[in-house]
Image: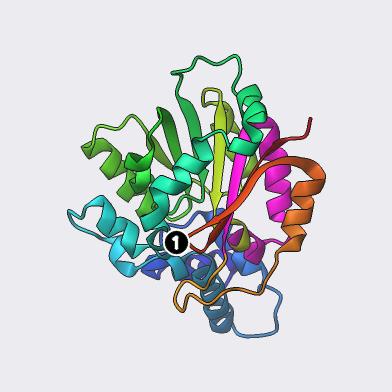
Amino acid sequence: MNKPEILSKIIQKKEFSQLPKKDIEIAFAHFEKRQCSDEEKIKLTRELLHKVFGAFTSRKLLSPKNKNEEWILRKHLSTRERLPYYKEVYEKIFSGFEKNKEVYEKIFSGFEKNKSISIIDLGAGVNGFSYKYFKQKVDYIAIESIGQLVELMNNYFEKTNLSTKAIHESLFELEKIKKIITETKKPRIIFLFKVLDSLEMLERDYSKKLLKEAMPLADKIIISFATRSMVKQKKFKVERNWIFNFIKENFRILDDFEIGGERYICFKKSD
């Protein structure tokens, strides 16, 4: 088989059928030159894609019928863990952080008090279904690679008359992501909840590149990592110093906290 035929074969499986071509190509590149059969390359590529995208998502999410927000949030492993804590997490993110109130006020000085904040949720999964937990006025945009989840969120936004949207795009299409961000109104906050590990599986150090390119466009970025295994709830020993040290060296950390087995780091441009 030639390359286009192999890529076409990979996406015949439903869970990969609506992934961006860019993500499929990056995953396949890991095995393209390996000395093995085309069938083995297809199998290995699918296994990698499942680790990156499918491991979090129940197959029931690919074709749900008339389910409410909580049902959806419980079917995605990432949001299932966060569900009991959404209110606390969002309050913490928007509170102004007691120890950094002056910094926070400086970030948003010059903007009207009641002005909405643009939230750009990169690698959103189904996080758009948590919209009701926002207590402040926000303009929310979800960017997600799994096409079925994008459709799911947009159907929800339409039914609930929310003036927000989900966009089907690869996070590896950096120029397109930057264009989406710049088209939103200021002030801007970027979410990257439990996303960076997945990006690193496909391309080493891409997280650093993404953060460096996105930070000049945003007022604040919040990243998060799981601190416990999603199934067994055992504490991870992984420190992730590679990304924490990078953030410390290049940005100003506003807050670093853990809620519900998830560590959040909030940061802005260096002064």
Residue occupying image coordinates x 64% and y 43%: 174
Residue 21: where, in percent of width, then height? 53, 55
Asked whether 52 falls inside the magenta stretch, the response is no
Q: Is residue 26 visible?
A: no
Relative height, residue 113 to residue 239 (above, below):
above
The C terminus: image quadrant: top right
Relative height, residue 198 to residue 31 (above, below):
above
- Give the left or right position of residue 252, taking residue 98 as reference: right
Residue 121: where, in percent of width, then height? 50, 43
Asked whether 215 falls inside the magenta stretch, the response is yes
Relative height, residue 95 to residue 66 (above, below):
above
Residue 250: where, in percent of width, then height? 79, 43
Residue furthest to the left? 66
For the record, the magenta segment spans 198-226
User: How has the structure been colored for display?
Assistant: rainbow
Q: Is residue 30 visible?
A: yes
Q: Nearer the viewer, residue 238 or 150?
A: 238
Q: Nearer the viewer, residue 192 or 253?
A: 253
The N terminus: image quadrant: bottom right
- Give the left or right position of residue 71, taking residue 102 as reference: left
Q: Nearer the viewer, residue 5 or 110?
A: 110
Residue occupying image coordinates x 58% and y 70%: 2
The kind of secondary structure element at disc 1 is helix
Residue furthest to the front? 98
Give the labeled residue for mark 1: 78
Type of amino acid under label 1: Ser
Residue 94: where, in percent of width, then height? 50, 35
Dividing the picture into quadrants, the one containing residue 187 is: top right
